[in-house]
Image: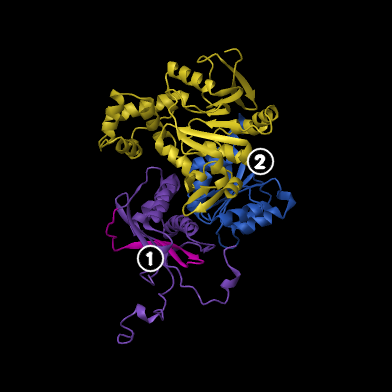
Chain colours: A blue, B purple, C yellow
Amino acid sequence: MRALVIDDSRAMRRIVSAALEGFGYETRQAGHGQEALDVLQEGYAPDLCTIDWNMPVMDGLQFVSAVRANPAWRALTLMMVTSESEQGQIVRALAAGAHEYVIKPFTADALRDKLALLGMLPEEAVL
Amino acid sequence: MTLAPDAVGRPPQPRPAIPALIDEATVESIAGETWIALVGEDEVLVPIPGDLPEDTLSAWVDVVGPWTGSVVLTTGRQTAADLTRALLGEAAPELLDHEDVADAFGEIANVVGGNVKAAIPGPSTLGLPEVGPAPAVRNPADVCRIEVCWRGQPLVVSVQGALPSLPVPNTQHDNPHQNGASQ
Amino acid sequence: MTLTTTSFDWVRQLVHRESAIVLAPGKEYLVEARLLPIARSMGLPDVGQLVDSVRTRPSPESTRKIVEALTTNETSWFRDGDPFTALTSTVLPSLLSARGPAERLQIWSAACSSGQEPYTIAMLLEDAMPTASTRVAITATDLSREMVERTRAGRFSQLEVNRGLPAAMLVRHFTRAGTEWQVSPSLRRMVTVSECNLAAPLPRMGPFDVVYLRNVLIYFDLPTKQAILRRVRALMRPDGWLFLGAAETTLGVDDSWERVVIGRSSAYRPLKGN
């Protein structure tokens, strides 16, 4: 399975990517929403996007809305991974079309649990 | 939902100061959880104060909402570099440049700041992390500050208002110096 | 550092035996940090003395505390999600059709820990049937008073709600309270919490339609396992359902149960005539 890790922090992209790779994902990275849209438009077809909220150029919520507006990307699973954790923000992200929401700080176990809920753990697919 | 319609047109309410919205223990638990999840599961923040070295670096995020201010992390430059290495793990370059440290330390400030923001009355918006010399404290009464040690090195988390203190309220009996002989 | 190599090795062996988790050398610091609160709660000054005390007087309670402190950071909500899927897909429909409309279903979460399991059950039921709060009663018990109080409070940290709780359920069933999340009053009303030692005669409870007894039996020897299963069965309805942990079974322990496969999970039902 493939994942696109979207976060403006390189350190955080590395942490999320390392966790996903540990679960068997191939990953690519983008530093903001617009860069991620460009990667998708180039034809990269991930199964999963992990999305930070606050980023320069295009934030995570705008990215989610843009992906949801394009039927070609309907199969893409969108998971917010952000320190934004007001209840109203989580509701907004889900309403915009995010499937799941992981609050920073998180552990690799937390990511794994959420992916398991979504049926998106590659190991399980192998079993 | 929280804004009563008749709130408009009333005289402005006094701005809440941060000590009324969050306490040290809460800031400490937010920072502690951030360290354990992000830096490493053995990376405990010990709540003992220490003297910051001369050469410090701060990372902060701004919170704008019913309360407006910054969540500022300050530590020695070397400690900030050690934190960066802990976050980057095997991916850390041999020589860290300022951008590496700004990125990693800034992200820690973002995580602590996001959680502080969610613990105080909202809705508020969170700015992107900034790194440099710490922003000045505008109003000493609008600060919630904790001092901790990480791997024996001092670190300060300061939740501080961005606005100067309000002018002295016009309720005169609050301030005997202003009009000493009256009453 | 109060932990000798011998004590550390004893802890490592214990954790490996009970959980198959390997604590690497060099994790003395972690053992110290995680076990110190347990030592303090038992009135002991340090972890070395805790280990000595448990070695000379072993008890399932202290063993469990030590293993849990070292193996679980936070309990997951849908930990091994299959027993919960089985509840809504198979068990609940079958029970609802077997019982009268006025009969209340009784569900027991027998080792509720900090409350994730009973509230997971309550959320699933409330989402599956609008009348859940009047049709179902959930009893949650735990050996530890601290866990009972935590379950009763129904407040969870950010790290706890991050562990396998679907975001949609979080915003639907919880409210943020400072850095924590408070479970909704309607769920709390469905759950009654009390202390209960499964290894001793049980209080009058039930009869239960469904029992979740997960990751408890592993801590006990065979005769105690048998006694617990016998006592649990005495509190169950004859057509009730028992869920054990993924690594647990009644097979070879107590032959008065029938194993039923539900999807990817298994449940155990009392055999008739026993």
Q: CA distance from mark 2 to mark 1?
A: 48 Å
Query: Same chain for the residues at labels 2 and 1, yes or no?
Result: no
Q: Please tell me which residue is depicted at 41% across the width and 45% down the height of the picture.
A: B40
- Quadrant (top left/top right/bottom left/bottom right) for the C terminus of chain B: bottom left
Residue type (three-letter) at the residue carrying disc 1: Val
Q: Is residue B125 magenta?
A: no
Q: Residue at x 43, y 34 (%)?
A: C71
| Left or right: residue A29 compared with residue B30 | right
Residue C20, numbered circle: none
Dot 2: chain letter:
C
Where does residue A71 sit, x and y in percent of width and height?
A: 74, 51
Q: Nearer the viewer, residue B20 or C193?
A: C193
* Label 1: chain letter: B
Count the marks: how many? 2
Mark nearer the viewer, 2 or 1 = 2
- Is any part of residue B88 visible from this angle? yes
Rendered position, B3 above or below B113: below
Q: Residue furthest right?
A: A71
Q: Position of residue B169 (x, y in %)?
A: 41, 79
Location of residue A82 with respect to B139 vertically, above or below = above
State the residue in front, A98 or C26. Answer: A98
Question: What residue sits 43% from the left and 40% below the top?
Answer: C149
For label 1, the residue is B143
Judge whether residue B66 is colored magenta.
yes
Q: Amino acid at mark 2?
A: Thr
Q: Secondary structure at mark 2?
A: loop
Residue at horizontal 33 percent and vertical 24 percent from the top: C58
Q: Residue B106: where, in percent of width, then height? A: 45, 58
**Looking at the image, which is closer to me, C205 or A110?**
C205
Which residue is under mark 2?
Answer: C131
Q: Is residue C76 visible?
A: no
Start and end of the magenta stretch?
B48-72
